[in-house]
Amino acid sequence: MQRSEYIGNFLEQIDCNSLLEKVKLEQGDKRSILGVKENVTWVSPDYNDAKRQMYETWEKAGYAEDGGSVEWINLYGGIHFDYDIVLKFSELVDATSHSCWVSQMPVGKCAPWHWDVNKDYDSIKNNPKMVRYSFFIDKPEPGKVFVINDEAHHMREQGSVYKWKKWDDWHLGFNCGLSEKFLFHFIGYSNT
Ligand SMILES: [Fe+2]
């Protein structure tokens, strides 16, 4: 089953290389199992349970709590890179941003099988307008892998954009390439 749909290549509309240069200078928000645990704040029982289940599943599977292979860094539009890029992307996909970030993954690190637990998930989960896109801002390199459900994305052309069939689908990322991996994520509300 197809899990995402190819939308097109935005390289001419959004300068991926300038964006990469910018985010490489930023520290961003580091994520790890310990980070996920520590970041659980009281939002709702469902939210807390979902977060807890995620890291418990990872630990049970054998991922180390800290200093292991689970690690990535989130860089947010308007904080770590220019919000104009978020607005430009929103315009190109005709959607309004709910959340938009670049993930940076060091070599040898991963984000194991999960779905993105948002603080307001309860209020948006059934909204038919929700959309999610993956924008491959990096140049293709063997070993930089992104999987949506059972669909693997590898060696995608720089600038290519895919729309998820199910915006809150399960996914994973793994970087067994030879340089850090970057991916642009967009969750929003369709304007159409
Ligand atoms: Fe994720």
Image (cartoon, grey):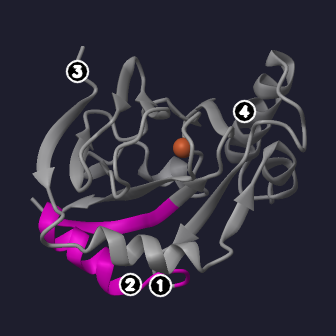
Give the magenta range: 79-102
**Alpha-carbon span between mark 4 and mark 2:** 30 Å
Residue type for callout 3: Gln
Residue to which mark 1 is pinned: 78
Residue type for callout 1: Gly
Choose the circle earlier in sequence order: 2 or 3. Answer: 3
* Quadrant location, ligand no. 1: top right
Q: Is residue 76 left or right of residue 107?
A: left
Task: Say which element carries label 1.
Answer: loop
Quarter of the figure with the N terminus: top left
**Alpha-carbon span between mark 1 and mark 2:** 4 Å
Residue to which mark 2 is pinned: 83
Decide if ligand 1 comes within 8 Å of the CB at mark 4. no
Residue type for callout 4: Met
Task: Say which element carries label 3.
Answer: loop
Mark 2: few/some/many CA within 10 Å (<14, 14-19, 20+): some
Position of 22 relative to 178 (above/below): below
The image quarter containing residue 85 is bottom left
